[in-house]
């Protein structure tokens, strides 16, 4: 234990100062702005209290973007987790020489998301894109991947999964390396099937890593912007418009900075509540005894 | 509770062969200890019996049935691991009942068996605790409880006491032995500690470099080691091994350094033969007519007196149960009864009768 001494807080000041300037001040300012009717460029700021919040919460566009965000967030994080975990388990069981493939699997994650999205956009382009061209040679009529509301959502989810599955795979693989193998062997002798070993021994041991990856990815995906911006721009219509896309539209297209700030605050509260709920549930399911 | 037979077992990891045709016969209810230095293949042999490693060639029979290719869960064995391998997120009761649950035993039957095993091991008050809340000895007991609950044909122990402190180790040693007597189970127990092997085993299998060196009861191994390795490995402090030659009349032995050791009667190896003389530290007595040796160091342990001698240039360790009034630097006569000496072939290491 570090013994607290008088004057030690002085050492804390520089980092706190930096955080205050780059993090707390903008946050406070955003909360402050959210109480005003304020257009970028105009001099007039009218205090309207919770007016922006009331406005937003009564809008169907907000609820639709909220729903889209949830769908994309849970769709892509769910997909990433399942595929990433399966790959991590496969890698864990693989022979050493086969592990070079893990580097190849990691490639999509090394590329900047915007570049990856551009690349995917070319692949998904209608008629002459790689995927359409391939399907057409087999005389299969391709879907309009980025133009139909349903397939645009699917494309966005797959794009995010393509970029971030390797990250989840690596984190869970690292966690698997730290697992005591005699636990698995004991379970084998105890008569557990592979599925039950996974369910009762491996997953409970990985809970900290699982909470970490899911939390980080969910936080990330709620801020999900770059890939959607490049792939669909929120379209067709508002089919792939997430909360961040809508915030961007409000702030930088319609210049309603007050309202955009209010939406930012709503997002913050929502994500915090969601993460807390997920942490609680996972911990409760696996840590409070196995029945 | 069943006999176990290992026939011509070999195991290779890639191009490295770690077991070279091992044969072991274990009778129903026998406590067998596999012992040997690190890397001798004892743990690999245990893992082959458990089915955690695939056997390269040879067979393993439990209760007369070939199990060499069966999955661990189908062999009806239980294993206690060195790390105990307790499931950290389960309580003691859940840990002990896990194997029953995996075999779809009814809830009330599970509870009954867990309570019964907990009673035997004195764990009844700890059933709701988690492994992290237990001491090393308690964890060890839970690991054994998990094995007992199953009532398997064979128990396997992989260096189960090596994580405990010395005092607890002696206590657990006795507990495991008593438990085995009460349950009358077949146990295969791996250790590198020859004292554990001597005190616990009905039968010891001494291994080195993937081969069996000798199989026998603890005292057989101690009194008639089949070769120099077993002689040197079993017994603490270790047997003194001196290279030299038996005299023409067979009544003395001359070491390579030129020291003469006299025997009261002629010994069995051919006169004039090159040999390695093995002398147990506790077989020495101090006598006026004995071989002169200089005391280099005296180590009193309280119960015994451990003395390092210089015998014509050879370091010799001797153990005396009486408190002798000796001083370091003093020269005394050492003698050994001729029926207590061991001879080994200097090339093959085999015992010479």
Image (spheres, grey):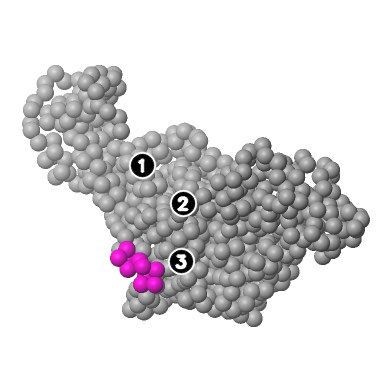
Dot 3 or dot 2, earlier in sequence = 2
| Disc 2 target residue | B165
Write down the region rendered in magenta. Answer: B118-127
- Left or right of residue A66: residue B141: right
Q: Is residue B283 above or below residue A216?
A: below
Quadrant of the image containing the C terminus of chain B: bottom right
> Can you tell which of label 1 and label 3 is closer to the viewer?
3
Residue at the image position 30 percent from the left and 22 percent from the top: A15
Distance between the alpha carbons at the discs numbered 1 and 3: 49 Å
x and y percentages locating residue B216 in the rendered image: 68, 69
Distance between the alpha carbons at the discs numbered 3 and 2: 15 Å
Circle 1: element type: helix
Quadrant of the image containing the N terminus of chain B: bottom right
- Left or right of residue A90: residue A68: left
Q: Is residue B119 magenta?
A: yes
Residue at the image position 64 percent from the left and 81 percent from the top: B64
Tags 3 and 2 on a common chain: yes
| Disc 3 target residue | B175
- Looking at the magenta stretch, what is its main secondary structure? helix
Tags 1 and 3 on a common chain: no
x and y percentages locating residue A190 in the rendered image: 48, 68
Residue at the image position 69 percent from the left and 60 percent from the top: B207
Q: Which mark is on residue A216? A: 1
């Amino acid at each position: 234990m570090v013994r607290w001494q008088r004057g030690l807080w002085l050492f804390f000041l520089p980092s706190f100062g930096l955080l205050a300037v780059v993090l707390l001040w903008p946050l406070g300012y955003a909360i402050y702005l959210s109480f005003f009717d304020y257009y970028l460029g105009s001099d007039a700021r009218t205090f309207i209290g919770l007016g922006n919040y009331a406005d937003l919460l009564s809008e169907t566009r907000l609820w639709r973007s909220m729903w889209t965000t949830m769908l994309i967030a849970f769709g892509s994080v769910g997909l990433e987790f399942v595929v990433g975990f399966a790959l991590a388990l496969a890698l864990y069981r693989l022979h050493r020489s086969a592990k070079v493939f893990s580097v190849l699997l990691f490639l999509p994650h090394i590329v900047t998301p915007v570049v990856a999205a551009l690349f995917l956009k070319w692949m998904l382009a209608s008629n002459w894109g790689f995927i359409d061209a391939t399907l057409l040679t087999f005389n299969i009529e391709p879907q309009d991947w980025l133009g139909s509301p349903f397939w645009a959502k699917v494309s966005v989810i797959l794009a995010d999964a393509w970029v971030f599955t390797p990250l989840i795979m690596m984190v869970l693989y690292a966690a698997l390396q730290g697992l005591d193998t005699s636990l698995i062997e004991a379970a084998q002798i105890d008569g557990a099937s592979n599925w039950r070993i996974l369910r009762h021994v491996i997953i409970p041991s990985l809970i900290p890593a699982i909470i970490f990856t899911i939390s980080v990815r969910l936080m990330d995906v709620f801020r999900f912007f770059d890939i959607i911006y490049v792939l669909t721009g929120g379209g067709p219509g508002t089919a792939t418009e997430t909360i961040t896309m809508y915030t961007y539209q409000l702030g930088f297209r319609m210049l309603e900075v007050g309202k955009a700030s209010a939406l930012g605050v709503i997002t913050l509260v929502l994500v915090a509540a969601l993460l807390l709920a997920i942490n609680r549930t996972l911990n409760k399911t696996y840590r409070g005894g196995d029945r | 509770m069943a006999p176990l037979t290992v026939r011509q077992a070999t195991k290779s990891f890639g191009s490295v062969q770690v077991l070279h045709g091992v044969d072991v016969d274990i009778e129903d209810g026998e406590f067998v200890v596999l012992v040997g230095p690190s890397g001798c293949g004892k743990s690999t042999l245990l893992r082959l019996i458990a089915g955690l490693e695939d056997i390269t060639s040879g067979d393993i029979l439990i209760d007369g049935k070939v199990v060499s290719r069966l999955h661990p869960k189908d062999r009806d064995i239980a294993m206690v691991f060195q790390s105990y391998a307790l499931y950290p997120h389960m309580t003691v009761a859940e840990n002990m009942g896990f194997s029953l649950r995996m075999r779809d035993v009814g809830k009330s039957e599970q509870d009954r068996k867990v309570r019964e095993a907990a009673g035997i091991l004195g764990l009844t008050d700890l059933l709701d605790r988690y492994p992290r809340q237990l001491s090393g000895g308690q964890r060890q007991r839970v690991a054994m409880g998990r094995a007992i609950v199953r009532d398997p044909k064979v128990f396997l122990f992989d260096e189960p006491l090596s994580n405990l402190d010395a005092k607890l180790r002696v206590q657990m040693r006795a507990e495991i032995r008593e438990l085995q007597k009460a349950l009358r189970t077949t146990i295969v127990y791996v250790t590198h500690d020859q004292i554990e092997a001597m005190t616990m085993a009905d039968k010891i299998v001494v291994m080195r470099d993937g081969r069996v060196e000798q199989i026998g009861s603890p005292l057989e191994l101690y009194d008639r080691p089949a070769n120099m390795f077993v002689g040197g490995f079993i017994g603490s402090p270790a047997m003194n091994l001196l290279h030299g030659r038996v005299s023409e009349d067979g009544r003395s032995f001359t070491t390579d350094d030129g020291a003469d050791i006299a025997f009261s009667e002629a010994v069995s190896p051919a006169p004039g033969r090159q040999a390695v003389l093995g002398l147990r530290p506790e077989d020495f007595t101090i006598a006026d007519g004995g071989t002169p040796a200089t005391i280099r160091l005296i180590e009193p342990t309280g119960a015994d007196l451990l003395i390092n001698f210089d015998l014509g240039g050879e370091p010799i360790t001797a153990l005396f149960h009486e408190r002798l009034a000796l001083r370091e630097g003093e020269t005394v006569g050492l003698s050994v009864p001729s029926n207590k000496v061991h001879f080994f072939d200097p090339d093959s290491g085999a015992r010479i009768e």
